[in-house]
Amino acid sequence: MKKISNWTTIKIILLSCLAGVLLLTAVFGKYLAPYDPLEVNYALSLQPPSSIHWFGTDKLGRDILSRILCGAFSSFSLTFVMLIIIVLVGVTLGLIAGYKNGLIDHAIMRLADVLLAFPDTIFAIAVAGILGAGLFHTVFALALIWWTKYARLTRTLVSSIMHQDFIVAAKLSGAKPHKIIWAYILPNVFPQILIHAILDIGAMMISLAGLSFLGLASQPPLPEWGYMLFESKQFMQTAPWMMVYPGLVILISVIIFNLLGDSLRDKLDPKQS
């Protein structure tokens, strides 16, 4: 069991380093890009990978490597902004539902059940169709569905510890509800919420990339990995590198964050200790 724990720790360190490299690339990608990702040069249109353009060029002659490096910021920033919104809303409502119980709990959970009846992607497409395509509308639509997961998770975790001795003792000592939540409840439920948030990074990235692939999220000319796939779909046979490289970086990013979340879950699982 100790060997398993040590190997899990090593995996967490390695995967954290890889995740850090991805995030640093997202922050400094525009400085690492060898070319201007927005510069159009029709003379270089659809050039295959070479020593000059390592990942080739797109239909407008723009360097794909530069667009991937600069697009990392858009892809990750959108994902983390949406994740922060979802976690804040979901955890807040889950804490209220788990602590208050009664009518408030029932109302929040029934609202979550209603929203969960709609598939997230289809709901986002419907919202984009009503409000119009755009990043704000897409993030809003996905956040409107995904907060329910964190609300239900938090509510379940809070309900499981509400009758434990340290919570009862805090109530008997006259502690205010907000102090009980911040000092006693939240620290006990936060590790599980953090693990689920890390695991959801990959899923959210795929969801945003998928909606961008449909032309509903990112709009030209700013580079974004999902929209790069959208631009490349008509050149799948004649210029496959336009789709291969953006798809590959999305795949690698999703795998890294999924493995990191799994490793953290194994590390914090009491059965592994």
Image (cartoon, grey):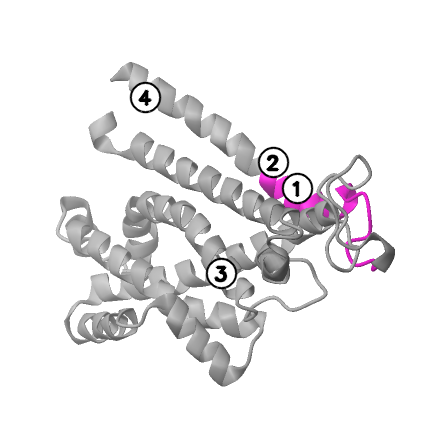
Please tell me the numbered disc located at residue 25. 1
In the picture, which quadrant includes the C terminus?
Answer: top left
Residue at x-position 71% and y-position 42%: 55
Disc 1 marks a residue whose amino acid type is Thr
Answer few, some or many: residues within 10 Å of disc 3's Cα (few below 14, many 20 plus, some between 14 and 19). some
Disc 2 marks a residue whose amino acid type is Val
Residue at which label 3 appears: 210
Residue at which label 4 appears: 5
Which secondary structure, mark 2? Answer: helix
Q: Mark 3 or 1 closer to N-term? A: 1
Estimate the spatial distance between the alpha carbons at disc 3 and disc 1, rounded to whole Å.
22 Å
Estimate the spatial distance between the alpha carbons at disc 2 and disc 4, rounded to whole Å.
24 Å
Q: Quadrant of residue 90?
A: bottom left
Q: CB of mark 3 within 8 Å of CB of mark 2?
A: no
Q: What stretch is highlighted in magenta?
A: 22-40
Q: Can residue 241 be seen in this view?
A: yes
Disc 4 marks a residue whose amino acid type is Ser
Answer few, some or many: residues within 10 Å of disc 4's Cα (few below 14, many 20 plus, some between 14 and 19). some
Which of pointers 3 and 4 indicates the residue nearer the eye?
3
Answer few, some or many: residues within 10 Å of disc 1's Cα (few below 14, many 20 plus, some between 14 and 19). some
Q: Mark 3 or 4 closer to N-term? A: 4
Residue at which label 2 appears: 21
Residue at x-position 39% and y-position 39%: 261
Residue at x-position 61% and y-position 66%: 218
Q: Residue furthest bottom?
A: 130
Q: Does the magenta stretch include residue 236?
A: no
Q: CB of mark 2 within 8 Å of CB of mark 4?
A: no
Q: CB of mark 1 within 8 Å of CB of mark 2?
A: yes
